[in-house]
Amino acid sequence: MTDKPDREHAGDAAVAFVARQPVVDQTGRMVAYELLFRNGPVSFSCVTDDFRCTSEVIEHAIGAIGFESLLGGLDGYINCSADFLFSNVLELLPADQIVLEVLESCKLDDRLKKRCNDLRAAGFRIALDDVRELSPEIEAFLSAVDIVKLDWPAIDPASRQPLVSRIRRAGKVVLAEKVDSREEWLLAIGSGCTLVQGFYFSKPQLMQGRQALPNPGTVLQVLDLLMNDATDEEIICALNAAPLLAEQLLRVANCSGRVRTRETEIISLHHALAIAGTNRLFRWCSLLLYNHPGRLPTQCDPLVMLAKQRAKFMERAALALNPRHFQFAQTAYLTGMLSLLHVLHGQDELVFASGLPVALPIREALIDRGGEFGMLLLAAEKFERGNNTGISNAGNIDPLLVTGAYTDTPMALAV
């Protein structure tokens, strides 16, 4: 793996890469993608540490690109070493959408067999990768897998159909991989393979997103709170000071296996934490520290500071409008916090907001300043430019009630 440049602050967002290659059924219909590690804008990978490469694929898929953008509702195949299969990082993944591929380097012993069956019970599917023959070791392991991926070119043509038949009699789905021609595709389907993957359908497609990392002090603070059984309010208070980590909590919540958050739009950080759970937040913070030892930004980005101030301003303005409607204020806070982060991701507001699992009123406010939260956001933007009439136009809010959010840091007024 190549070294990455140090990032001195969140504004120096790096580019995160993941490649995806389609998996198709017998009719050629795309049913899944295999997600592949890439450490740059290249068509190949340089894998020296299977565990770290898989952990980076997951971090990039969740935090920088988004599973919805990568998979589009289809299943995702992820390569896993034995160590990774035993890790708690898997708790971050949407189990019902993910196929875990047991690499050919794994020792297929009873311990791994039990772990794979436990993962299947949790909702994952298990695939055995790069199979060339049905050895006694593999045959004994079949009860712990759902899919067998055949290294199609490496199998003697005369042995293919009998091998496929034996695997199918065991009740497993057979996937022929490395199929690079129409002739080989027809042979694979004719031999009884249910799924096919290879260059004939598509070479791996490079996907990318901007990777803006949260402040390491906040990550460590949140980890400390989680390890010491802090209350949800204490955790939310820490997240309020870290817009980037708060945004990533939304994405982690969107991958939660407990609730289909793609159908449950998030309205506040309290809501996101309830969906994701403190355990997944702990796993995410741990993953950030593992993947970026000593490389997380150490200085506070002015844009992040302004996002925090804007969020606080909008929360106070919302409470001024509706003193007893605390959920309204929480949603206003989240809207303000998210309203500047598209810049750090190198995206326009439409693309950024469309990729977040937030409620429609938040999305409308971020995209076109629509609705009540859009009104508050416009007021905040006008105030940042020194135009206090934006406050009085937003529901006759008394400017003196909300300006405290900006009084400590005059730089916000110069934007």
Image (spheres, rainbow, N blue to C red):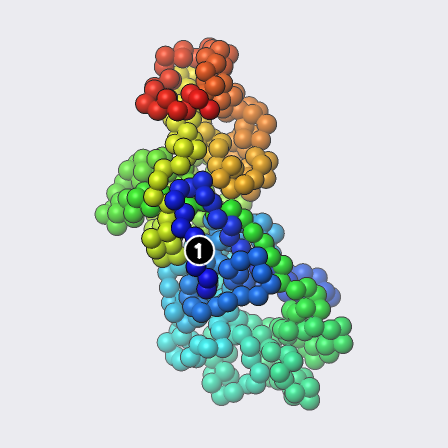
Q: Residue at x 50, y 82 (%)?
A: 138
Q: Residue at x 60, y 57 (%)?
A: 206
Left or right side of 282 for 162: right
Residue identified by numbered label 1: 4
- 91 lies above or below 327: below
The picture places residue 87, in percent across and down from the top left corner, at: 37, 64
Between 18 and 155, the one lying in front of the other is 18
Three-letter amino acid code at the position of disc 1: Lys
The picture places residue 91, in percent across and down from the top left corner, at: 41, 57
Secondary element at image label 1: loop
- Say how many tags the image has: 1
Q: Quadrant of residue 300?
A: top left
Between 251 and 105, the one lying in front of the other is 105
Between 12 and 327, the one lying in front of the other is 12
Left or right side of 162 for 78: left
The picture places residue 242, in percent across and down from the top left corner, at: 37, 38
Residue 409 in view (yes/no) = yes
- 387 lies above or below 227: above
- 407 lies above or below 117: above
Graded by Cα atoms within 10 Å as few (under 14), some (14 to 19) or many (20 or more), the crowding at tag 1 reads few
The picture places residue 187, in percent across and down from the top left corner, at: 73, 78
- 260 lies above or below 312: below
Left or right side of 229 for 200: right
Q: Residue at x 54, y 30 (%)?
A: 366
Q: Quadrant of residue 262?
A: top right
